[in-house]
Amino acid sequence: MSDMQEIKKTQDEISGVLNEFQSTFSEFKEGVSTNRDTIENMKKAFEDLSVKNDEMGASIEAETKAREELELAMARIQDSGGDPNEIKSNPEYKNAFSTYLRERKNIDPEISDIEMKSMVNKEAGRILSDQEFVAVKTLLVGSNPDGGYNVPVDRSAKIEKRRFETTPMRRLATVESTSTEAKEWVLDDEEFGSEKVGELDARAETDTSQIGIITIPVHEQYAEPRTTQKNLDDSLWNVEAWISGKLVERFSRVENAETINGSGAHEMQGICALPDWTTLGVYEREALETRDITGAAGASIAADDLIDLQSDLLEGYQSNANWLIHRKIWAEIMKLKDDNDQYLLNPQMLFAGVSPQLLGKPVVMSGDMAKPNATGEYTADSIVALYGDFREGYVMLDRLGMRVLRDPYTTKGVVKFYTTKRTGGGVVNFQAIKRLAVPSSDT
């Protein structure tokens, strides 16, 4: 190969390398341009993120300040002697809370209507209607920055409570206290024997009565409600007093129910749980005289049944006697009519505001007594009415009263209220109370 050919070949090789380098350089230059655009985009995104972060920081700072203003407003109202139950109706509190809620909206503009409504309902203490919520939302996020959340923050100081069936037995019975786990009563319910004799007749030994002992033990009832320390500290009403009041009511209802139907095992002995005298008019200890209503099982009470029951009680107990029945039974008694379709009881006495009376004696309503079912039928063997001197016949026994052990230690952040009460009760006079029952289905 000639020198020219070698030079040409070398030039071609160099030219190829240069072309390849040019191509690589062009690609590199294009990549640098692309990377520069990427860097510029990242820089711009970072700047935007920084601005948003500053805005979010400002919003959080504003929300924090609004929350502090809300807490200060609450503290000022409390320090000035304001009723804790009426704080939310105070204009200062309303304005502070409206500002706080708007700042919360600024922090989370994507908050849903469901979340917002939940927040507003919680503060209002009730569930707002759709119309009320629309009005509140308009004030909150609309063009009225000073209007604020003013509509549903009023809260009544009264707490509406559910009512339960109960029996006012403490008002009727004898209530005593004890410092021991039981108390005894001497029962003198037997007679001495005696005989009629002539002047010179022999005298035989007569029977000597035997006294009895009635023992009423006390039984423990307990409850352990709990709440958080934060709830105790921050609630606008006295949660501890509310818990105490609820427990007093609960314990009282349980005691009252036991005086009527208690089995005597770890609870009071109920009047309706005692057995019947084997024969009407024949006294038995540890049992009560029980008269069946006339008619078959499930039959309604007749006027004669009430008269017969009242006449079963001795005269010595009549002066302080009461009827104890369920209000549904009282309604059935009020419906009793004579052969001329006239009411036996005068309905006008109720409209005149007179306390219910039956055969001249007060009627006391007991939610724990038996009642007819929805179709007006009575359960066989159920006690539907009591009549007697309950102060003479029944004793309720208290041991120390209610005690509360406040425990904030077992579970951190949670306060337990371990509450106990020891009470007992039972019949101490088996003549003083009479019962009216539905006969058994096999009678």
Image (cartoon, grey):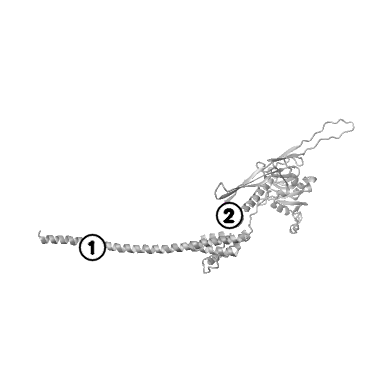
Residue at 33% across, 64% down? 37
Near mark 2 (Cα within 10 A), the count class, few <14, some 14-19 or many ≥20, is few
Q: What span is colored magenta in the figure?
A: 228-235
Q: Position of residue 292 (x, y in %)?
A: 72, 45
**Residue 54 seen in this snapshot:** yes
23 relative to 190, above or below: below
Quadrant for the N terminus, please.
bottom left
Quadrant for the C terminus, please.
top right
231 relative to 275, above or below: below
Q: Which of the pair 141/435 is nearer the observer? A: 141
Q: Is residue 234 magenta?
A: yes
Residue at 73% across, 54% down? 334
Residue identified by numbered label 2:
233
Q: Amino acid at mark 2?
A: Asp
Q: Which structural element holds mark 2?
A: helix
Q: Is 432 displayed left or right of 7 in the figure? A: right
Q: Position of residue 208 (x, y in %)?
A: 80, 34
> Main SS of the magenta segment?
helix
Q: Position of residue 175 (x, y in %)?
A: 72, 46
Residue at 20% across, 62% down? 18
Disc 1 vs disc 2: which is toward the camera?
Answer: 2
Q: Which of the pair 264/437 is nearer the observer? A: 264
Identity of the residue furthest to the left in this view? 2
Residue identified by numbered label 1:
22
Residue 335, disc: none
**Residue 111 seen in this snapshot:** no
- Tag 1–tag 2 contact (CB < 8 Å): no
Q: Is residue 273 magenta?
A: no
Q: Position of residue 281 (x, y in %)?
A: 77, 41
Q: Which of the pair 70/239 is nearer the observer? A: 70
